[in-house]
Image (tube, rainbow, N blue to C red):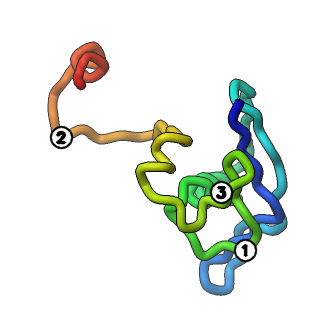
């Protein structure tokens, strides 16, 4: 069973503090939800967890291993992300997309 742990995560865009000391954990199969108004850091939190933003303080761990320095392949084996908005360059149906290998 995999575990995601976020410990004392803080992130700033230059001088604007977006995340401050965020701590939580989630086990494989557990459903968690992040709610809040626009601009409070939900997308920034996901970008840190996914390794898109790496200049945060604190730590993001998968099975007690830091994601900093983890290869993209290893990250892809551990984490999946479905964005809220996606613009396709191709006119495939959902079924055609799912059936692609």
Residue in front for this viewpoint, 71 or 42: 71
Residue 22 falls left or right of residue 49: right
**Which residue position holds label 3?**
45
Q: First in sequence, mark 1 or 2: give its number.
A: 1
Query: Which residue appears at 59% of the width and 66% of the height?
Result: 68
Report the Cα–Cα distance between label 3 and label 2. 27 Å
Secondary structure beneath dot 3 equals: helix
Quarter of the image with the C terminus is top left
CB within 8 Å, label 3 to label 1: no
Q: Is residue 94 above or below residue 16?
A: above
Marker disc for residue 90: none
Mark 3 nearby-residue class (10 Å; few <14, some 14–19, many ≥20): many
Secondary structure beneath dot 2 equals: loop
Mark 2 nearby-residue class (10 Å; few <14, some 14–19, many ≥20): few
Q: Mark 1 or mark 2, which is nearer to you?
A: 1
Residue in front for this viewpoint, 75 or 94: 75
Which of the 4 image quadrants contains residue 85? Answer: top left
Query: Which residue appears at 27% of the width and 13% of the height?
Result: 95
**Which residue position holds label 2?**
89
**Which residue position holds label 1?**
57
Residue 60 falls left or right of residue 51: right
The spot of residue 3 in percent (x, y) is 73, 40
The spot of residue 66 in percent (x, y) is 66, 60
Q: First in sequence, mark 3 or 2: give its number.
A: 3
The spot of residue 64 in percent (x, y) is 74, 52
Residue in front for this viewpoint, 37 or 50: 50
Secondary structure beneath dot 1 equals: strand
Mark 1 nearby-residue class (10 Å; few <14, some 14–19, many ≥20): some
């Amino acid at each position: 069973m995999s575990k995601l742990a976020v410990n004392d995560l803080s992130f700033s865009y230059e001088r604007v503090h977006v995340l401050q000391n965020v701590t939580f954990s989630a086990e494989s199969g557990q459903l968690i939800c992040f709610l809040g108004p626009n601009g409070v850091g939900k997308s920034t939190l996901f970008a840190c967890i996914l390794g898109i933003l790496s200049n945060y303080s604190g730590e993001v761990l998968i099975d007690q291993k830091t994601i900093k320095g983890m290869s993209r392949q290893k990250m892809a084996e551990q984490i999946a992300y479905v964005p809220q908005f996606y613009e396709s360059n191709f006119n495939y149906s959902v079924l055609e997309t799912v059936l692609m290998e």
